[in-house]
Amino acid sequence: MNQILCSSGAIIGKANNNDYTLLKEYASKLDCDGFELMMCSSWYHILDDVIAAVNSYDLTIPVIHSQKSLGEALCGMTTTFSDGRFHDRVMTADEDKQTFEQGTERFKLNLKLAEKLGAEKMVFHLWNGTVSDRNIERNIERFGEWKLLADKAGIELLVENVICNTNSPLQNIDLVAKKYPDAGFVYDTKMAEFHNQTMQIFSPEYEYILKENRIRHLHVNDYGGGYMDWAHMQVLPIGAGHIDFDGFFKKLGEYGYTGDFTVESTALAKDGTVDIDMLNGCFSKIRDLEKRFF
């Protein structure tokens, strides 16, 4: 049976100071099979404390989501904002070297979190942030170095189809898949729908990724905006947007998907309260979709 996980990012964030100790409080209230723990930038200097505490909660954590901005260390570019506009700049050789080295050290700490908590997989944003995928060839080339580190640690590094501003997510996934024949991926329904690509993974151009069992994990979230609608980026619960989950799960079942699911729907309000009922409703809907189509 596929596991249904809750992303810690759905319940822990700025509104509650990224307080990892809240996992213990909320875990007993959530009807999920485990958690996908997201690394927060504020945890680097207290990582050993985070690991010790989370281990003491006796939770099932098969997946770690690496810090979202790690991929920016790979691209050799930076972005500044002035005169009301973003401006890309290619880093100098020294800047690039330092940024990549610092990013690699942070990446190693993300791997440490995964290893110490017994996770087998780690979600990775190969492109991310304002720079996004504008220098994607550089990102993909350097990905091999970090993938090797993950392989040695026994952690499966999975590239997610995060939103882009140059190519499309599936174009980039295709590039990675062909460069690294053993690379695996996370498919996020909200990220896909943002680019009108939710069902394109089943197209003749991309279905080989499913046929080769390279989609190893799913993020099941809804989306309510239009094509590349940057004003409507909220991660919605299943049914609150316009994704055809019946159609998606039906096709997914036909391809024999065997991986797990993570719900990332934003449940954390500005006042720090968490909508437990909404999350439990998402878990229930996924279980229903599994029974009907798998």
Image (cartoon, rainbow, N blue to C red):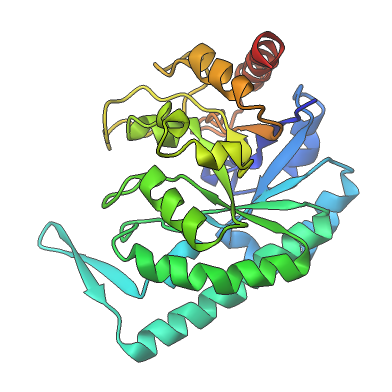
Q: Is residue 54 above or below residue 274?
A: below
Which residue is pictured at 48% across the width and 78% down the height?
100
Q: Is residue 234 visible?
A: no
224 to the left or right of 54 = left
When the figure is inspected, residue 92 is found, relative to residue 210, above or below; the finding is below
| Residue drawn at (69%, 42%) of the image | 36
Q: Residue furthest left?
A: 83
Nearest the camera: 232 or 25?
232
Instruction: Please tell me how many numbered marks the rendered image carries.
Output: 0
Which quarter shows the N terminus? top right
Does 112 sit above or below residue 92?
Answer: above
**x, y percentage for residue 221?**
51, 27
Q: Residue at x 52, y 73 (%)?
A: 103
Q: Position of residue 180 (x, y in %)?
A: 55, 61
Q: Residue at position x 61%, y 45% from top?
A: 214
Vertical position of residue 263 compared to residue 42: above or below: above
Residue 217 x/y as whole percent: 63, 39
| Quadrant that contains the C terminus | top right
Q: Is residue 257 left or right of residue 118?
A: left
Front-lying residue, 23 or 108: 108
x, y (%) of residue 174? 43, 50
Front one among 200 and 288: 200
Residue 187 horizontal side relative to residue 30, left or right: left
Drawn side of residue 293 relative to residue 193, left or right: right
Q: Is residue 225 visible?
A: yes
Looking at this view, is 109 or 43 the one in front? Answer: 109
Quarter of the rendering containing residue 280: top right
